[in-house]
Image (spheres, grey):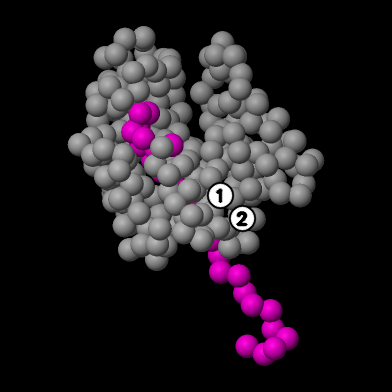
Amino acid sequence: MTANTPATTAAGKLITFVGGDGAGKSTLAARLHQALNDAGHTAVLIGKHSTDVPQDPELSGYLDRLNELVYRRDAGVAQACGDHYWLLALASWYTLQDRLVIQPALAAGTHVILDNAHHKILARYAVNPEVSPRLCEQVFAYLTKPDLVFFLNIGAREALVRKGSFTSLEAGHAGGGDEDFIRYQDTVLDQMREQAERGAWLTLHVAQLDRDQVYKAASTALADRLHLTV
């Protein structure tokens, strides 16, 4: 490199989390994000409502309005719009978040901790007979591929003990009882396990682990797979 040649910034790493409702994804994502920054890395935590586009308030405002349409709406509206609409609406949200927030951060050398990846949506639609699995895969096919996917594997019954309560969506709109939640979540989890095998995700069996043990296993994986020490 000559004296006049600018240094190239190494791309950041994209780290995502997959698991059923109550698996502990958000807790682990937040802890790893903090640990990476404390260790001197530059990392951002991106979740369901992350709409800030650096230095572009107009794009931030547009992304926030889309987020409001997709996530901050009445349950009755959600039911009326139907499955195909919500698949495409979610794909629009993930596509814009990827293009406007995630890709620029990675290009700037910032590591991205993505708490709310699209893989759970793929799993939910895979058990929905009304929507083609091929369509689901196609609408998310252009998102940035993660460098590391953590799959927090825990059965629905154990997850429910941790959560304590659940929404109608988390029970697949199949009923309001605990067994409705468990039945639906275990069906979706089977789809996640298939994705984990195909995608070579890093599976953490978290049912018998406390939060510190899960964090230790995840931080070890960051060092082994991505050479990020925390």
Q: Characterize the magenta stretch by its predominant secondary structure.
A: loop
Instruction: Check disc 1 and report its element: helix, strand or loop.
Output: strand
Where residue 144 sits in the image (x, y, percent)?
Answer: 53, 53
Labelled disc at residue 202 = none
Which residue position holds label 1?
44
Where residue 60 sits in the image (x, y, percent)?
Answer: 72, 40
Check residue 200 for magenta coloring.
no
Residue stretch in magenta:
1-26
Left or right of residue 94, residue 165 in this image: left
Residue 122 visible in image: no
Where residue 151 sits in the image (x, y, percent)?
Answer: 33, 44
Relative to 111, residue 66 above or below: above
Rendered-image quadrant of the N terminus: bottom right
Residue 84 visible in image: yes
Which residue position holds label 2?
105
What's under tag 2, amino acid-wise? Ala
What's under tag 1, amino acid-wise? Val
The quarter of the displayed image where residue 119 is located: top left
Residue depicted at 56% across the width and 65% down the height:
11
Sequence-wise, the earlier of marks 2 and 1 is 1
Check residue 2 for magenta coloring.
yes
Relative to 35, residue 10 above or below: below
Residue depicted at 50% across the width and 45% down the height:
114
Report how far apart the C-alphas of labels 2 and 1 lie in the structure. 8 Å
Q: Are marks 2 and 1 in contact (CB under 8 Å)?
A: yes
Instruction: Check disc 2 and report its element: helix, strand or loop.
Output: helix
Q: Nearer the viewer, residue 194 or 68?
A: 68
Q: Local crowd at mark 2 within 10 Å, few (<14), some, or many (≥20)?
A: many
